Image (cartoon, rainbow, N blue to C red):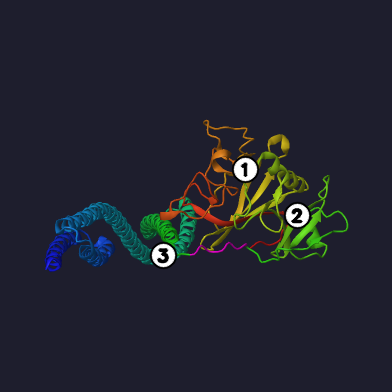
Amino acid sequence: MKRSIYRLNSSTQNSHTVKTIRKSLCILNNQSVAGAEIMKIILIFLFIAPLALSARAEKDFSALDSAASPETKSRFAMLDDVRILANGLLQLGHGLKDFVHKTKGQMNDIFQKLYIFDKSFYELSLQTNEIKEEEELLRQTTARLQINNEEIKNLSQEMNLKIEDLIQNKIQLQEKVWGLEDKVTKLAITQPTVQETNEISSLKAFVERQDNHIKQLLKIVEDQHAQLDKQHNQIMELEDKLNHIELQELAENSFTGEHTEPEATPFYVRNSTAVTYKYEGAAPDCTALYNSGIQTSGIYTIKPNGSEAFDVYCETKFGTSWTVIQNRVDGSLDFNQTWDAYVKGFGDLNEEFWLGLNKTYSITQQGDYILRIELQDWKDNKRYVEYAFDLGGPETDYTLQLSRISGSIPNALPEQTELRFSTADHDMAVINNFNCPENYLGGWWHSECEETNLNGKYVAPRSKGRLDRSKGLYWKPKKGRYYLLKSTKIMIHPTDLKSFD
């Protein structure tokens, strides 16, 4: 009987405790889904706890039968076990609550970052759409201007034909005037008749009308030419804007990782392990080597008059051979060098290099030479410009004077001006306290820190198409856009070249 009563009381108390614990767990479960794993652990613990309590009770019942201990003592022992269990579950509940709050904070941070990212992506999309709309508008405007330009050209041709006709009429009128002068001379001797006087008056009136008509046509032609020039300038400005927008798209694609930067390729194809040829005798430059029968591009040894022998890279093109003094193709060589390095030369003649101011000077002292600069932008467009030039010696800091001959790109170097070569450690003319070579990262013939520098730091277009003017390899005419360059080459040749490209 005692054992039955004891089991009934224990079962009632355990049932009540289990219900209380399950209500607490339901509340905790509603607070956060992140505590699901902990809830599973607690449920497993609740499943094992009654078994442990039941085993404890069976043990106590055996003790009651054997030792006949009091019923009150066993009941209090069970209550203590339940309190311990409840206390442990309460601590677990507090830990779970703290974990839920911490997890909510982390999720809020994640949501906030995701919101900022979505906002930035949306703004970038709007900017991209605006650029595309502006590009399309510019393309349409350019097309209309080109059509107008064609119409004006046709009108100008018609006007030219009319002018030619008028010139022929003018010649005929002049002949008639000369005839009239003869008649007037005769009239000075003999008295003219009334008929002859009327004829002279009518001819004078006709000549005056023709002259006025010719003047009007010439004024119309001048107005048409002025309009053509204006249209041409507008088209050039629109083309510059279109090129700038295309550069922006190129940079944005690179920024988002959707565009692969094009590989840097030189202007000519050659073996990187070119053979060095020895010339028997004193060849003063690459042109003399070509004339002697060596007509393949490569590395050769030359010996200018009054100078030691040294190696150069000779490039065969246009039916002759040019001496290359600078070559840049991929940015593998740092051109931010010292004054001594630029004087002596640096780099690998098979790759990127600077021949050296002293060597170039020794070549150009043999006669008059042409300086040819070849440029290639990041869209693989190729341009060139050629100058007649004079290079001074070391006592003048290798001063350069240029005079443009021809080219397919606007001029960006001052002409008929002494350009002194300078580097970051050898700048003899600091203008307005602005050290050009140090800011422009490379030795060059600077003039008032102009914006063209073919020995600058090798960089690719930045995001949004902006150009860092303080460094980079670029060509900038005084009036015109920047040409950010992918490769450059500077060559010299005697002025006896018979034909040019």
Let me know if residue 263 is in the magenta part: yes
Residue that sits furthest to the top in the current view = 433
What residue is disc 3 on? Answer: 153
Q: Quarter of the image for the C terminus: give it.
A: bottom right
Q: Quadrant of residue 52?
A: bottom left
Q: Position of residue 110 (x, y in %)?
A: 30, 55
Dominant SS of magenta comes to: loop
Viewer-closest of 132 and 70:
70
Viewer-closest of 367 and 263:
263
- Dot 1 lies on which element? loop
What residue is disc 2 on? Answer: 312
Q: Is residue 304 left or right of residue 209?
A: right
Q: Quarter of the image for the N terminus: give it.
A: bottom left
In the rendered structure, which disc, 2 or 3, sits on the residue that comes first in sequence? 3
Badge 3 amino acid: Lys
**Which stretch is magenta?**
260-266
Q: Is residue 180 left or right of residue 83?
A: right
Q: Residues within 10 Å of mark 1 (few under 14, many from 20)?
A: many
Residue visible at 54% across and 32% down in the picture: 431
Badge 1 amino acid: Gly
Q: Residue 443: which numbered mark, if any?
A: 1
Q: How many marks?
A: 3
- Rendered position, 29 above or below 459: below
- Dot 2 lies on which element? strand
- Dot 3 lies on which element? helix
Q: Residues within 10 Å of mark 3 (few under 14, many from 20)?
A: some
Gap between marks 2 and 3 measured at Cα: 50 Å
Viewer-closest of 28 and 32:
28
In the rendered structure, which disc, 1 or 2, sits on the residue that comes first in sequence? 2
